[in-house]
Amino acid sequence: MPLAPHHLLNDRYKVVALLGQGGMGAVYRAQDLTLGRTVALKERTPDPNGTTQGMAQARAQFHREAQTLAQVSHPNLPHIYDYFSVGDSEYIVMDLVEGENLHRLVQERGAQPEALVLNWARQVLDAVVYLHGRNIIHRDIKPHNLILTPDEQIVLVDFGLVKLFDPSQPSTLTLLRGVGTPEYAPLEQYSREVGHTDPRTDIYALGATLFTLLAGKPPPDVHVRLLHPDAWRCVREVNPGVTFGTESIIEKAMGLYPQQRYQTANDMLQAFGFSPARLIDKIEPSPLRPAAPPPSLPPSPATALPQVAAASPEPPAPEARQPIAPVPADEEDFEISRLKQSPTGLLAARGIVRPPKTEEPADEHTQILPAKLKLSVSIVRGVLRMQLGLGTYLEFVRVPAGTFLLGSDPKVDRQAQPDELPQHQVALSEYWISKYPVTVAQFTIFTDATNRPVPFDFPQKSLHPIVNVNWYDALVFCRWASDITGKEVRLPTEAEWEKAARGADGRVYPWGNEFDAHRLNSAEGKISGTTPVDGFALGTSPHGAWDMAGNVWEWVNDWYKPDYYAERVGENPQGPDTGYYKALRGGAWFSDQSRVRAADRTHFNPENRYDYVGFRVVVVPDKSA
Ligand SMILES: Nc1ncnc2c1ncn2[C@@H]1O[C@H](COP(=O)(O)OP(=O)(O)O)[C@@H](O)[C@H]1O
Ligand SMILES: [Mg+2]
């Protein structure tokens, strides 16, 4: 019998409502009358049919749950405030996490978009890395125990099966052999023969959780998998929109035997391309250098309230999607402008059929690189062209291996900022960078082919840069492009972006040291919105990349750290391991000449979407190229 509202416990906690009920008790929303705050109250009631020994064990485990919570402090875990008994029942008082658990969310709304799930995965992995670092194994990771708060934070709750682990003696501390929900529990949680639960138990559960979130239904449990190996379904069989890269990570995490999985949560984090985040203090945006449009600018309809728009965690519903305007004739000659997709084109983009040969321009310099899948990657007159769909290509220019000057010399550039210092030589391996920011045409090929919602409020012009994509959207685009071409497409590092923008000689702008409003779309040109990515031929960089200055800010891969250059990483710097904001480069249409300098850096929360932020990508061709 759950406690009724107004029930007073320990003279201090007044029950407000039931939040959830399990076999061993319930969780309530309650009012802490002493401190005047709302809390969550987790109750364990004795099993009336239990043995004395069983009851003692359950009580000890509940106490262990409380003690474990008392040891941890992490943004994705709840804080505990109090622990007490009333009669035979025990209570944990903790943070009330507002929101909905992911089990309920999937029940109500089905499979979730990959970009969102990756964001959640990063947060859970962060918490799991943290726990494992303290020899704590959760053993009950599943959608039911992950609460999504209104501000898109994921909190891992329910330490009811937690085990404290001694890595030197894995067998001695097996306390209560916890069996969670079958779909999320690996073999070793059922069978002692397989081994003891250890950190890899959580890896399996997390893989199964991500499966459910992306597929909209749980994977087969291990019994089914053992008895009927054919019953296994890949995530992509259930939801073809999921990228191959993500599917492979889930499959590896869900290896039947612990040795087959990622051996540590950190390995899994790195497989996703996430570096451990949120372990350091937030870096607050510098008030002196706003990246957002200055308030004096009259907001154009497309740019009104970018911050508010950015706070919206949900992509628009498919019905909110607006038709794409026909491509104007003057854009027609540009190859990426074709938006009309034949069904074959869509299938080709999904990697299901090969597009007709005639699509490939006959060119004697064309060199077909061995693509893992179906769509062609070729080099035509020094430009690497990667087919995304019928008539739609990503084009890349080559940045040869070699050193360049990263950052600013205040003697050359009076507008240099502290986060650009000290200027130093950096060596980069060869890479190819997309000639233009990813366009509306290119991005909508991806959303069409994968049945993904399109970003809200993007310019209805195929050759404009795509905007209103957060860092994770950009990441998923990269994974998709990698899938269909068999090449590793990724976001550039800060250093790669900067070298592509200014070459080796430390120039201030892509074309030289002097600002020239005719060479880019910046505040000085008063265009007040995005422009086609091929609009400024005089603004190209020494390596032939367009639009590196102005138009839209571009996400890059690195976490932002203002004093990162002081570390003087001299070879292929990847940015700091940890961070809170991702770095962006290049300035936007409202930026003035100081912010469109090639060395200028800014940073945003990777979860946010802005109508002046897009991205470009890089690819490293095979050695044979
Ligand atoms: N701190 C909390 N704040 C808000 N809701 C919570 C909190 N802890 C648990 N819940 C909700 O109550 C449900 C049951 O709690 P849980 O700790 O998972 O108990 P059980 O061990 O019975 O599964 C969870 O799935 C979650 O939805
Ligand atoms: Mg639970």
Image (spheres, grey):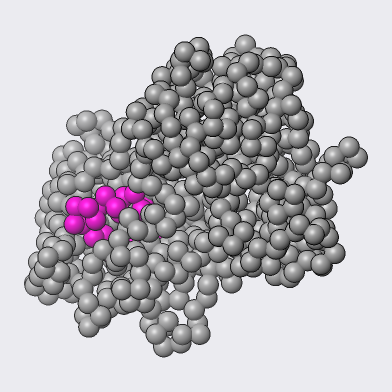
Give coordinates of residue 587: x percent, y percent: 59, 26
Give coordinates of residue 445: x percent, y percent: 72, 53
Q: Is residue 141 magenta?
A: yes
Assign the C terminus to one quadrant of the image.
Answer: bottom right
Q: Nearer the viewer, residue 30 or 54?
A: 54
Q: Nearer the viewer, residue 485 or 293?
A: 485
Residue drawn at the location 67% of the way across and 37% of the way down: 544
Q: Is residue 177 above or below residue 613?
A: below
Residue drawn at the location 72% of the way across and 23% of the way down: 519
Q: Can residue 292 be spotted in the picture?
A: no
Which quadrant of the view contains residue 547? top right
> Would you say 164 lies left or right of 430 here?
left
Give coordinates of residue 416: x percent, y percent: 48, 17
Assign the N terminus to one quadrant of the image.
Answer: bottom left
Q: Which residues are magenta?
A: 124-143
Total number of numbered labels? 0
Q: Name, please, the residue furthest toward the bottom.
A: 227
Q: Is residue 54 magenta?
A: no
Which quadrant of the view contains residue 266? bottom left
Give coordinates of residue 181: x percent, y percent: 35, 69
Q: Nearer the viewer, residue 149 or 538?
A: 538
Q: Is residue 325 above or below residue 290?
A: below
Q: Is residue 398 above or below residue 239?
A: above
Residue drawn at the location 42% of the way across and 83% of the way down: 224
> Would you say 375 lies left or right of 262 here?
right
Q: Name, please, the residue furthest toward the right.
A: 329
Q: Nearer the viewer, residue 533 or 310?
A: 533
